[in-house]
Amino acid sequence: MKVKEVSQLTGVSVRTLHHYDDIGLLTPDRTTQAGYRLYSDDNLATLQQILFFRELGFSLKKIKELLTSPAFSRQEAFEMQRKMLLEKRKQLDSMINTIEKTIQHGRGELVMTNEEKFKGFDFGENPYEQEARERWGDNAVDESNKKAIQFGPELGEEMNRIYFSLAGVRHMEPSSDEAQARIGEWFTFLNKMGSYSLEAFAGLGEMYVADERFTKNIDQFGEGLALFMRDAMAVYVKKGK
Amino acid sequence: MKVKEVSQLTGVSVRTLHHYDDIGLLTPDRTTQAGYRLYSDDNLATLQQILFFRELGFSLKKIKELLTSPAFSRQEAFEMQRKMLLEKRKQLDSMINTIEKTIQHGRGELVMTNEEKFKGFDFGENPYEQEARERWGDNAVDESNKKAIQFGPELGEEMNRIYFSLAGVRHMEPSSDEAQARIGEWFTFLNKMGSYSLEAFAGLGEMYVADERFTKNIDQFGEGLALFMRDAMAVYVKKGK
DNA sequence: GTTGACTCTCACGTAACGTCATACTTTATA
DNA sequence: TATAAAGTATGACGTTACGTGAGAGTCAAC
């Protein structure tokens, strides 16, 4: 693939590709005798990595260090990026929460401290960098520090967010589009909370295996997934009791 | 408030505040006779605006144009920023989806086109700018173009995301922390889907008004909210049938 | 065989600060 | 009350991650 194709596919500018080549961050595998850059599939995979890290606020220099580290593993990188993206999503939620409150505050319906007005903005020194450095930094790695995994999302904040959202439109017609859109959010949220009983959940797991249609559907995503899910769900329910 | 206080509260550097003063983006209301900058609450509110727009990718120049526009309204700005943040959240979801797929692809369990590998990255020319320009641009405003509001989230993508997530750990112990965390996601998702019947939803709305404990709790967020919600929920259910 | 789309390499420009250096103010402490 | 420590101000140059032409070569098509 030549520069423009890559550019169109990925959304980065041609100049950016040149730049990444200049600084040695992404050098295309091959070039024509005329000097045209030719990007391989592997190059594209690397570019994807670069864009993920860039989105997470890493400098190009840091990205280069990471990618060229001997300890670097693409798979692990993806797992880490997944976590970071989820983390960023939480931050975004916090910002959205803040703005909902602020809207009400502007209407004089809510008192807000200055601190509250800036919640969600303090990105404080890329917490990600630390983790990345630990993982692939020069000084080897301490493999043994597995962190406890959080169990389930923090629903409280989301609930507050929706309440504020609703409060903001409570003087409008309940049947208006805006109001209905927000009450719809509330509906889906409620469903998230707890109406699905644990027993029903376990029963569903059984069905995944018993009913062939389910099995086929689910196993599209990976062989044996349905079976795995049934077992995992059974454990989940047992724990929940 | 002096520079450092503002800096600590908001997370922006002192230098940045100096810079914003230099370019006339945020000039503190008062200064001491020694030349120290003193920021008022109003200044802080403006700073909040600036940070929101900055997070959304606007240049400082554009932000200045917006803030100084005669047509600018802080309330409207917040409403718009809310929409934009929600939009950005959707993009993030898309990226997370992409990375889940990519992880599986790396294990050779899934075929992916190059296009799929870059889904979620193409931010394409700040779609927000257009809207902001329409709203507060130099050439007045066309007030009449209200857009239809989307009704409810796209659950399909989220479902796929979770499937992929699960598939990624299906060779682990079903009782492992990692597996359980992901099956927990599945549980909450299922609840989101449809287990909460529309009838129950409407009944809940009635309770908001009938049961004083509910009413009190909800009206914390704004007087009359409980009543409003009941009505809005009733409409929602009627529409859903 | 020439036109238009694409590519290359300089090279300078820009946005949004970071990073000293130097000097003045204010606050805390002995 | 003196004096250090912490905070602030103004230059001024540095830096990152590209943008934006300029001028020239390359390639596919009509």
Image (cartoon, coloured by chain):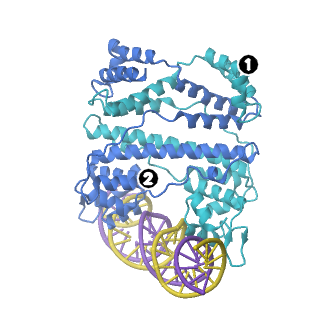
Chain colours: A cyan, B blue, C purple, D yellow
Question: Where residue B57 sits: x, y (%)?
Answer: 44, 56
Q: The disc numbered 2 marks a residue on which chain?
A: B
Q: Is residue A229 in sight in this rendering? A: yes
Secondary structure under badge 2?
helix
Residue type of the residue flagged with mark 1: Ala
The residue labelled by disc 2 is B55
Which of labels 1 and 2 is toward the front?
Answer: 1
Please, is residue C27 above or below residue A176 in the view?
Answer: below
**Residue D10 rendering spot, x and y as whole percentages:** 33, 73
Left or right of residue B240: residue B63: left
Residue farthest to the top?
Answer: B210
Label 1 crowding class (10 Å Cα cut-off): few <14, some 14-19, many 20+? few
Q: Residue A110 versus residue A217: which sits nearer the camera?
A: A217
Q: Give B33 or A31, whichever is nearer the viewer.
A: A31
Q: Position of residue A69 (x, y in %)?
A: 72, 60
The residue at 37%/34% (across/down) is A165
Please state if D6 lies on the left or on the right of A106 as rendered: right
Q: Which residue is found at the position 66% from the left and 37% from the top?
A: B165
